[in-house]
Image: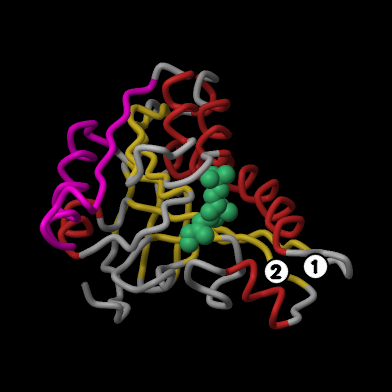
Amino acid sequence: MSTAPSPPGPARAPRRASGRLVVLASGGGSTLAALLAAHDDPAFGARVVGVVTDRAGAGALDHARAAGVPTAVVAPADFPDRAAWDEGLAQAVAVFTPDLVVSAGFMRILGAGFLARFGGRTVNSHPALLPAFPGAHAVRDALHHGVRVTGCTLHVVDAGVDTGPVVAQVAVPVLDDDDEATLHERIKVAEREQLVATVGRIVREGMHVDGRRVRLGG
Ligand code: GAR
């Protein structure tokens, strides 16, 4: 896939009282768990209807199973190439007919095939204040750079690596004695809160993307 960011056209996530969420995850799934903890409250306005991972061993699958949410594993090793995997991922997600796809700790780039179907209604949670520190090692990179403030970003996914329009951000201070693990844990606390609050708003109020600008509601 291309890593060049392409400006997304105007897009609107549907305004719906019972939004269907599909969550993509690769790891332990604490951000997924926050959405699962929220989705039984009718005021949240959304339900996680499916969880798709790229790894059979992802802890996120345990959270999904414990909540009675169906799962699918789409592992790159089961596909001949990246484009075929991307198409397989899109098909697995499409089975759940999502209104919004949430990449929450999913450590792979979503390609052209996936974005052709779900572009404009896929958001990603990233553990840094984008556009600073994109990529897979955002917390380590921020620490090595010596920034005093980092944080988390929820953004619309486009064809680039963590380049899409920003929906929400929360700042997290870097403490003198932080290492990657302690800093990431504090970022994840902020991330879970931001994810639940913002995904709820997207589903309840709608999301309008106009170039780089994102507006919720209205
Ligand atoms: C989160 O901090 C998320 O932002 C990050 O992985 C963590 C997942 O935590 N994602 C990325 O770094 C993607 N580039 P979890 O497995 O406990 O939900």
Q: Is residue 183 above or below residue 130?
A: above
Q: Secondary structure at mark 2?
A: strand
Residue 102 as seen in the image, left or right of residue 130 = left
The one nearer the camera, 148 or 47, is: 148
Residue 65 as seen in the image, left or right of residue 129 = left
Residue at 47 percent across and 71 percent down: it is 135
Q: Is residue 76 visible?
A: yes
Where is residue 44 drawn, in percent x and y? 52, 28
Q: Residue furthest right?
A: 176
Q: Is residue 40 above or below residue 88?
A: above
User: Which image quarter holds the N terminus?
Assistant: bottom left
Residue 42 as seen in the image, left or right of residue 79 = right
Q: Quadrant of residue 137?
A: bottom right
Q: Which residue is mark 2?
A: 150
Where is residue 64 drawn, in percent x and y? 43, 26
Query: In the rendered structure, does residue 89 fall within the stretch colored magenta?
Result: yes
The one nearer the camera, 134 or 40, is: 134
Q: Earlier in the sequence, mark 1 or mark 2?
A: 2
Contact flag, marks 1 and 2 (Cβ < 8 Å): yes
Q: Amino acid at mark 2?
A: Thr
Residues under labels 1 and 2: Cα distance?
7 Å
Magenta stretch: give its range.
69-98
Q: Secondary structure at mark 1?
A: loop
Identify the colour scheme used. Answer: secondary structure
Residue at 26 percent across and 47 percent down: it is 75
Where is residue 203 drawn, in percent x and y? 42, 39
For ligand 1, tell me if the residue under mark 2 lies within 8 Å.
no
**Disc number placed over residue 174 in the picture, else none:** 1
Residue at 43 percent across and 39 percent down: it is 58
Where is residue 117 drawn, in percent x and y? 17, 52
Residue at 70 percent across and 79 percent down: it is 144
Query: In the rendered structure, does residue 76 fall within the stretch colored magenta?
Result: yes
